[in-house]
Each structure stands twice: as structure tokens, then as C-alpha cells.
Image (cartoon, rainbow, N blue to C red):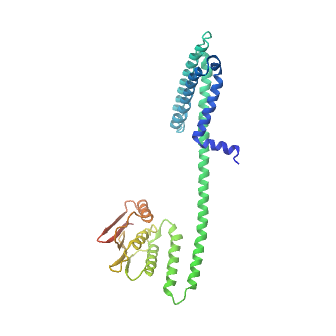
Amino acid sequence: MVNGKQAISYIFRRRYLFHAMVWLMYALFMLIDMQSYVIKRGWPFMLSPFLISLLLMTVLVYGNTLLLIPRFLERKRYLPYALGALFLIAFNTLLRSKSQQYFDAIVWPTDLMTIDNYFKWNLFYALWFIIISTLLFYSQRWAEQRAQVRNIQINQLQTELKYLRSQINPHFLFNGLNTIYGTIDLQNSQARNMVVQFSDLLRYNLYEAETDQVHLHQEVAYLQNYVALQRARSDASLSIALDIAISNGNRLIAPLLFVAFVENAFKYTTRDDHQANNISISLNETGDQLIFVCRNSADTEPGRPGIGLTNVRRRLQLLYPARHSLDIGTDAGIYSVTLTLHL
């Protein structure tokens, strides 16, 4: 069941509902205040002063909340805000007084009053509505900020729960892999090696690659394990070549920059027994440059880039701005990727 505090908070956060309720209450107040017009001249006569009063108060309130507060008060420009508020108050007071004097003269032609008779109360109303609209503006802002904080807390809790689940699942996976490894016959070295390679790939993805940078030799080892695993599951029709020429494995680079291109090569390479099916991968270090080349035979150029390639492009733009070049294309049935990093 929704309590009173929750209901008020809901109204404050729903901007249009809140404004509708405020103006409905003001309209009811004006109807009560103009009862004498209804008694003397009827409802049609009362409609004109009612709409004029509502329009003038709308200009006052929204001139304050949509113009003066955001442009001046929020920026701590107090003098321009004060001058603008005084102008709105004077404008509203004068026009409301003129309007009331005009309609009162029609209703009570024998009791004519000067504008001074209206000025004091209209000045009070204008000042009061400036104060009220300012307080309501910041009350609504406070309610919206509380809602944002609550959403952030909920998102943080969900993230924490996902993190805790991710800590549970890897342990389950590693224990499962160890169990599978233990049940494989000792003579079946290929299957045992595949389990070990997959376990190393998983461990690198979950733990070592979580950092901003890794040593180059770690990335090379991951690449070698990945290619070895793919080679073990591929048939003899696919020729796979991996060439690594690295002199300084302690260089630091962002993790998992190359594997998306390698995954793409294995995904889109041809599998036709009547033609050469090739994947060649090289990673060479030349001075301060790291050159990665991946080529694979392909019937057609892959269509829309997947999430992996899109993410790598974005990471390169963020991590190596003006320090990388990426060329991707197809020529004579060979799909090629050349990535050069300036370290």
C-alpha cells in the first residue's frame, strides 16, 4: 500500500501531474475569490477576469521557474535574478490591478476605486507566488535527485549481485573442467591438452584481462592457446599458420585486442574441401611498432560487423588515439586485417 510520503514523492517526480495539481488549486482559489462577479453578473462575465488573472500568474510563475532561476539563480548570479524577479512582480501587480479596477467598475459603477486600492494586495500575491514557485522548483529538483540516487543505488546493487554471481560461476566452471580433465584417459593427450588450453583461456578472460594493461607475453600466450584449441577442433582441410616474433614480452598493451579478429577469421573462413582453406596470423614487433596481420580465405566479405569488432574499434579509438592504424578488406577471396600499434 502506498503511504502519504510515497504519494507526495510520486507527484513531485511527475512534472506534468504536479503542475496540473498546482494550477487546479489556484483555479479553485480564483473561483472562490470571484464569487461576487458570478452573483452580480453571472458566469459568462466572470470568465474574462478569471482567464486574465490565470494568464498573468502563469507568466509570473514560469517566467521565474523557466527563465530566471535556471539562467541566473542556478548560476549564482543573484543581482540579475533579483532585478528580473522585481520586474515580474511589478509587471504582474500593475496589470492585475488594472484588470481588477476595470471589471470592478463594470460591476460596481457607483463605487469606483483608485488603483492604489488594489496595488497592495496584488503586490503581496505576486511576491508570495515568486517565493512559492521558487520553493516548489527546488522541492521538485530535490525529489528528482532523490529518485536518481535511488536508481543509482539499485543499479549498484544489481551490479554487485552480478559480480557475486560471476565469482561463483568461474569456480564452478574450473571445478568442472578439473573433473573432466581427471576423467579423461591418460593416453588421450590431445583431449587433456584441450581442456588445459580452454582452462587457461577462461582464466585469462576472467582474471588477467580485467586490468587496463597486460604484458605482451601474456597476450601472446593467450593467442597461442586460442589458436591451438581451434587447430585441434579443425579438420585437415584448414591450414592454420601462426607466426610470433616478439623481442620484448614485457611491453604493456591493452588486453584482448587481437582475439576478436582471430575469432572472426575462424568464423568466416571457407570450409570447402575442393579449394585451399587458409588462416594465417602473425604478430611482429618492429622498433616501437607492433604489427598484427590476420588473413583468411573467405567466399564473401563478412557482412555487418559483430559486437566484438565494434568493441575493438572503439577501444582502439579510446586507448590508442592517433597511435594505431587498422586496415580491413577483401582481395581475391582473402579477407585481411592489419593492425599497427605505436607503443
Query: Quick check: 218 left or right of 237?
Result: right
Residue 230 drawn at (x, y percent): 44, 78
- In the rendered image, which quarter is residue 129 located in? top right
Task: Looking at the picture, tell me which residue is in the foreground, 273 or 112.
Answer: 273
Query: Quick check: 330 left or right of 21?
Result: left
Query: Quick check: 31 left or right of 320?
Result: right
- Residue at horizontal 57%, vertical 81%? 180
Is 77 drawn above or below residue 37 in the view shown?
Answer: below
Residue 46 drawn at (x, y percent): 59, 21
Can you name the residue that lies furthest to the bottom here?
Answer: 187
Residue 260 drawn at (x, y percent): 43, 69
How many numbered markers are drawn? 0
> Quick check: can you spot residue 6?
yes
> Quick check: can you spot residue 142?
no
- In the rendered image, which quarter is residue 128 located in? top right
Is 61 drawn above or below residue 271 in the view shown?
Answer: above
Can you name the residue that lies furthest to the top here?
Answer: 110
What quarter of the picture does the C terminus occupy?
bottom left
Is 99 drawn above or below residue 195 in the view shown?
Answer: above
- In the rendered image, which quarter is residue 288 located in? bottom left
Task: Looking at the picture, tell me which residue is in the foreground, 39 or 15.
Answer: 39
Residue 188 drawn at (x, y percent): 51, 88
Task: Looking at the picture, tell me which residue is in the foreground, 152 or 277.
Answer: 277
Task: Looking at the picture, tell me which residue is in the foreground, 135 or 310.
Answer: 310
